[in-house]
Image: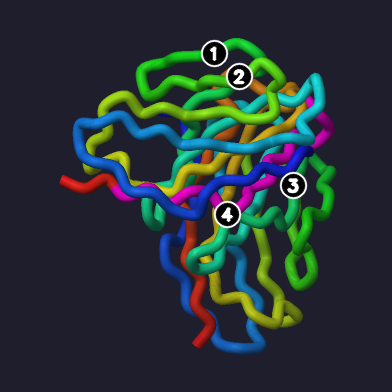
Amino acid sequence: DAKTTQPPSMDCAEGRAANLPCNHSTISGNEYVYWYRQIHSQGPQYIIHGLKNNETNEMASLIITEDRKSSTLILPHATLRDTAVYYCIVRVEGAAGNKLTFGGGTRVLVKP
Amino acid sequence: DGGITQSPKYLFRKEGQNVTLSCEQNLNHDAMYWYRQDPGQGLRLIYYSQIVNDFQKGDIAEGYSVSREKKESFPLTVTSAQKNPTAFYLCASSSYRGQQYGYTFGSGTRLTVV
């Protein structure tokens, strides 16, 4: 699975959009981009995933560049409950073992 | 409701003792995983199992053992050979071919060696 690079931390104002970048320059054509978040001392929670097209769900939007070498997770209206570590992961869908490889993630602090 | 149950939530172990962490899922998922997380770090894969009676080592399998006798259960044993077992342990499951919503994680077991 391709490696990802994320900033270690970022702050965001409550009510504003939070834009979380992720670089995955070695991504291959059949690898998906997944985003998870982990609130302190809990298990990670799935947020969203995509292959080529931008995706949106009730939690967030995922913007993937045309060359697929980077992506941005957008939390449209950050709340204090969005404070968490956000992980960007790339992997092949249905690959043997379906393993998820976690990097260090981005620690997001939403401030009032 | 379907989900993954890990027990216990907190576990204390004396040095030199083996201890088993429980993980049960009722999601009918084929694959199950164990991860370890140290403070301020990401998750590291210990073992995973794609099917009953089969499992593979992850990145940090030394000092750990697993079994997969039932689809619903994937217990992890932390043996005395694990030199630094104090950590947060997370169990996860997914359908074998991947699914739209990816993995489901349990709430974790925090193991402390005293």
Q: CA distance from mark 2 to mark 3?
A: 24 Å
Q: Mark 4 or mark 1, which has the lower sequence index? A: 1
Q: CA distance from mark 3 to mark 1?
A: 31 Å
Q: CA distance from mark 3 to mark 4?
A: 21 Å
Instruction: Classify 10 Å Cα crowding around label 3: few (below 14), some (14-19), many (20 and above).
Output: many
**Mark nearer the viewer, 3 or 4:** 4
| Residue A47 image point, x, y percent | 47, 29
Report the side of A15 relative to A37 (left or right).
Answer: left
Q: Let me know if residue A27 appears in the view.
A: yes
Q: Mark 1: which amino acid?
A: Asn
Residue identified by numbered label 4: A104
Q: CA distance from mark 2 to mark 4?
A: 20 Å
Q: Is residue A105 magenta?
A: yes
Report the side of A61 relative to A101 (left or right).
Answer: left
Q: Residue at x 78, y 38 (%)?
A: A1
Secondary element at tag 3: strand
Residue identified by numbered label 2: A50
Asked which quadrant contains residue A90, the reply is top right
**Mark nearer the viewer, 3 or 1:** 1
Residue extending furthest left? A112
**Do callouts 1 and 2 mark residues in contact (Cβ within 8 Å)?**
yes
Looking at the rendered structure, which numbered label has been put on residue A7?
Answer: none
Task: Name the subunit of mark 2.
Answer: A
Q: Let me know if residue B71 appears in the view.
A: no
Looking at the rendered structure, which numbered label has been put on residue A54?
Answer: 1
Secondary element at tag 4: loop
Residue identified by numbered label 3: B48
Q: Mark 4: which amino acid?
A: Gly
Task: Name the subunit of mark 1.
Answer: A
